Amino acid sequence: MTWDDLDVHLDRVPGTVSAYVGRLDAPPTWTRHADAAHYAASTMKVAVLAALHRAAEAGTVDLDAPVPLVNEFDSAQPGAPRFSCAQLYDNDDAVWDRLGATATLRWLADRMIVRSSNLATNLVIGHVGLPAVAEVWALVGARNSVTGRGIEDFAARDAGITNVVTAADLAALLGALASGAGTPGTLAAPAACSAMLDVLLAQEHREDLAAGLPEGTRIAHKNGWVRGVRHGAGVVLPDDAPPYLIAVCTTTDPADGGGDSDSDDACRLIAHISAQVWAARHQL
């Protein structure tokens, strides 16, 4: 299948499908609506992870010091009451089991990525601040992505404050981490970038991008999903070819029938794209 063939196939898919594919530190091989804005879902947690490690480098947080686990957070909407997360919408009971006790920020960051814990994410944001996350997006050259609020901050959401990503910006962020793990960069020191990639490699939600790869293929990635939205972005590390970036964002309008029932379809679609890119890995 050629890239044109893949575009024709995706043209028949309802909603918006965006993609960015290419080698590290090189122009993309294939893009599709790569600058189209999508609700971020949990993909914004990669930027939060980077902000945390940058804060640790600056000495403003200690990754291994215990912090209290609470479920009450400041809203991004000025004057709004504090908000809480709902365990029903989380993906990691392990964090909730420690509520009222303590845990390290390193452990919370791990749960934020590998299990996509919303509670862990808001706890980390509480320690680094949203401006630090915005700085990460700026440093990697993101043009459209914004992390404006924590998860389940409904007062901010209702005021129009939201979290947005694009396939191109997600690729830029993952590319900065992967490139920075080998050489000093502007995002973080090589050791910090390498540590972040290790967390992303341990991702336990593997039903989209990873599902399109041969068993055992290493991929440092993060996905995200809410009703009508499914995204995946990562760095694939083949044994027989150079690493490559892949970011796929899908949004279906719930009013047109998209929603929870389409989650499996979206996973299969992203897995299909991932498989096609894998097949072309030597020509990227």
Image (cartoon, rainbow, N blue to C red):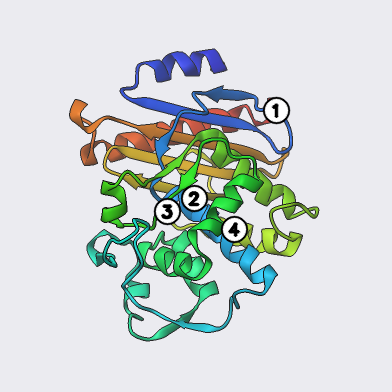
Nearer-the-camera pick, 44 or 88: 44
Of badges 4 and 1, the one in the foreground is 4
Tell me how far mark 1 sits from mark 2, CA to CA. 22 Å
Residue 142 can be seen, yes or no: yes
Q: Which residue is mark 1?
A: 27
Q: Is residue 134 above or below residue 190?
A: above
| The label number, if any, that marks residue 35 in the structure image | none
Tell me how far mark 4 sits from mark 3, CA to CA. 20 Å
Which residue is the extreme one toward the front?
79
Image coordinates of residue 275 in percent, x first then y, are 51, 32
Image coordinates of residue 9 in percent, x first then y, are 42, 17
Q: Label 4 is placed on what type of residue?
A: Ala
Image coordinates of residue 242 in percent, x first then y, are 73, 39
Q: Earlier in the sequence, mark 2 or mark 4?
A: 4
| Kind of element beneath mark 2 | strand
Q: Label 2 is placed on what type of residue?
A: Lys
Q: Which residue is mark 3?
A: 205
4 and 1 marks in contact (CB < 8 Å): no
Q: Earlier in the sequence, mark 4 or mark 3?
A: 4
Tell me how far mark 4 sits from mark 1, CA to CA. 23 Å
Q: Quadrant of residue 160?
A: top left
Q: Which residue is mark 2?
A: 222
Of badges 1 and 2, the one in the foreground is 1
| Kind of element beneath mark 1 | loop
Of badges 1 and 3, the one in the foreground is 1
| Kind of element beneath mark 4 | helix
Residue at screen point 24% across, 64% down: 86
